[in-house]
């Protein structure tokens, strides 16, 4: 004879908690507390013979039939050696995403990642991930949660994909550390947005306008000497922003016209030597050195380098009529000028410190320009009009 809804409704609280068991399903019943609260429960012995009692759901959250089906499912897990009560307790008291992020940054990133990478990770965590998921238990986070959050950031696909990538990396580590259940990472099936690779090259006229703007703004003290120098060095060397901002005088070899960068994006391949052209050498020879400060691009704080070039660059580009030009586009412009001058792509890749030929291949169409021009010159020389 089964326990019925009518019987459950008729159960009244007593001086002590008690259980009304279901005769049709062993170890399944309804617990009635002194307060009158009624809860579906299951009692069982785990594989070690220990008696366990766990709540399935309060009356009203599940119907009697639903609770009975859930009890059968849980009993099946017990038969397979699981301990549902223990696993539920572990999930409720387990690590949060904030705990996971702390461990990921400390145990995985420190000593492996560059300072700039760690700073970028921390920014993504503080700005996006932790405000949304910080209090979630690791095993609580679902594919739907992550996918919905990723989709909500579709207006900024680059940031959305960086957030997704970091979540995936952390959950992969959680799986390795045994913090995820057997279903694995819920982020595994989520695909990033397609990103359009933006390429903006300054023309010769735009470079001239930039040069004149820098001179005027520096003369009028709208931007500082070292801010202007940083922008000029980015144009003249093709270096990355951080490589110029953190450049030390000890790595500048003016006699041999070289910069020797120990720390750069591809530093796993060793130090990178950057050749210095005449204008770059002239700039560095005339740039004032500050006693006690080891950096070429001096910052506002004593013995420190400049840390923010974005604000002065915004003023410069607006004044020069280059509002759509990012700082990184100066590197593209260096490569563009080299390709247009007929320099082989392999050499351009070496100048830029590219780790693979595929990265340099984006400039292949520009490298064809001088070849086309040469063909046109030859054609004009040998052209014979019909008599």
Image (spheres, grey):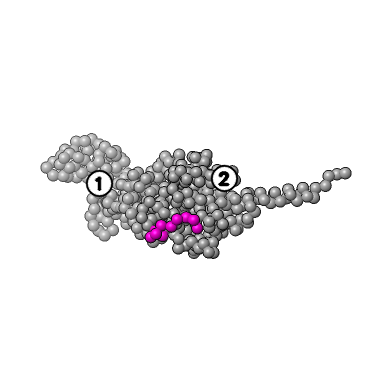
Relative image position of residue 149 (x, y in whole percent): 40, 42
Tell me if mark 2 has few (under 14), some (14-19) or many (20+) residues whose alpha carbon lies within 10 angstroms of its own.
few
Could you tell me residue 320's position as x and y percent?
A: 52, 41
Asked whether residue 58 is in view, the answer is yes
Q: Do callouts 1 and 2 mark residues in contact (Cβ within 8 Å)?
A: no
Q: CA distance from mark 1 to mark 2?
A: 75 Å
Q: Quadrant of the C terminus?
A: top right
Looking at the image, tell me whether mark 1 or mark 2 is earlier in sequence order: 1
Residue 14 vs 233, above or below: the answer is above
Residue at horizontal 53 percent and vertical 56 percent from the top: 282
Q: Which mark is residue 209?
A: none
**Of all residues shown, which one is farthest toward the left?**
15
Front-lying residue, 111 or 332: 332
Magenta span dominant secondary structure: loop
Horizontal arrangement in the rendering, residue 52 relative to residue 137 (left or right): left
* Callout 1 secondary element: strand
Q: Which mark is residue 208?
A: 2
Instruction: Kindly tell me whether residue 160 is visible in this rendering.
Output: no
Q: Secondary structure at mark 2?
A: helix
Tell me which residue sits at (34%, 44%) in the image: 131
Q: Which residue is mark 1?
A: 55
Q: Nearer the viewer, residue 86 or 367?
A: 367
Q: Give the residues in magenta.
A: 285-294
């Amino acid at each position: 004879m089964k326990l019925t809804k009518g019987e459950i409704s008729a159960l009244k609280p007593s001086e002590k908690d008690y259980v009304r068991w279901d005769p049709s399903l062993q170890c399944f019943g309804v617990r009635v507390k002194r307060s009158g609260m009624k809860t579906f429960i299951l009692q069982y012995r785990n594989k070690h013979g220990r008696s366990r009692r766990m709540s399935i759901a309060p009356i009203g959250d599940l119907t009697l039939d639903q609770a009975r089906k859930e009890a059968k499912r849980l009993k099946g897990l017990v038969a397979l050696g699981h301990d549902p009560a223990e696993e539920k307790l572990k999930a409720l008291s387990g690590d949060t995403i904030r705990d996971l992020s702390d461990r990921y940054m400390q145990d995985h990133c420190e000593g492996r990642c560059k300072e700039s990478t760690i700073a970028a990770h921390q920014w993504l965590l503080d700005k996006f991930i932790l405000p949304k998921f910080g209090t979630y238990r690791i095993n609580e986070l679902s594919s739907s949660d992550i996918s919905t959050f990723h989709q909500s950031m579709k207006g900024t696909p680059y940031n959305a994909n960086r957030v997704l990538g970091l979540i995936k990396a952390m959950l992969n580590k959680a799986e390795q550390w045994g913090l995820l259940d057997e279903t694995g990472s819920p982020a595994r099936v989520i695909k990033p947005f397609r990103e359009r690779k933006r390429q903006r090259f300054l023309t010769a006229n735009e470079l001239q306008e930039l040069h004149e703007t820098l001179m005027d703004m520096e003369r009028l003290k709208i931007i500082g000497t070292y801010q202007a120098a940083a922008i000029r060095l980015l144009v003249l060397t093709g270096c990355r922003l951080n490589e110029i901002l953190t450049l030390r005088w000890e790595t500048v070899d003016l006699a041999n016209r070289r910069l020797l960068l120990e720390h750069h994006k591809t530093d796993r391949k060793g130090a990178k030597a950057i050749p210095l052209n005449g204008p770059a050498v002239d700039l560095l020879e005339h740039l004032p050195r500050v006693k006690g400060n080891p950096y070429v691009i001096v910052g506002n704080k004593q013995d420190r380098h400049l840390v923010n070039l974005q604000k002065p660059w915004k003023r410069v580009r607006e004044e020069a009529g280059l509002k759509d030009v990012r700082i990184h586009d100066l590197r593209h412009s260096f490569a563009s000028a080299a390709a247009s001058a007929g320099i082989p792509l392999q050499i351009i890749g070496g100048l830029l410190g590219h780790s693979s030929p595929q990265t340099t291949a984006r400039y292949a169409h520009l490298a064809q320009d001088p070849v086309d021009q040469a063909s046109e010159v030859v054609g004009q020389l040998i052209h014979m009009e019909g008599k």
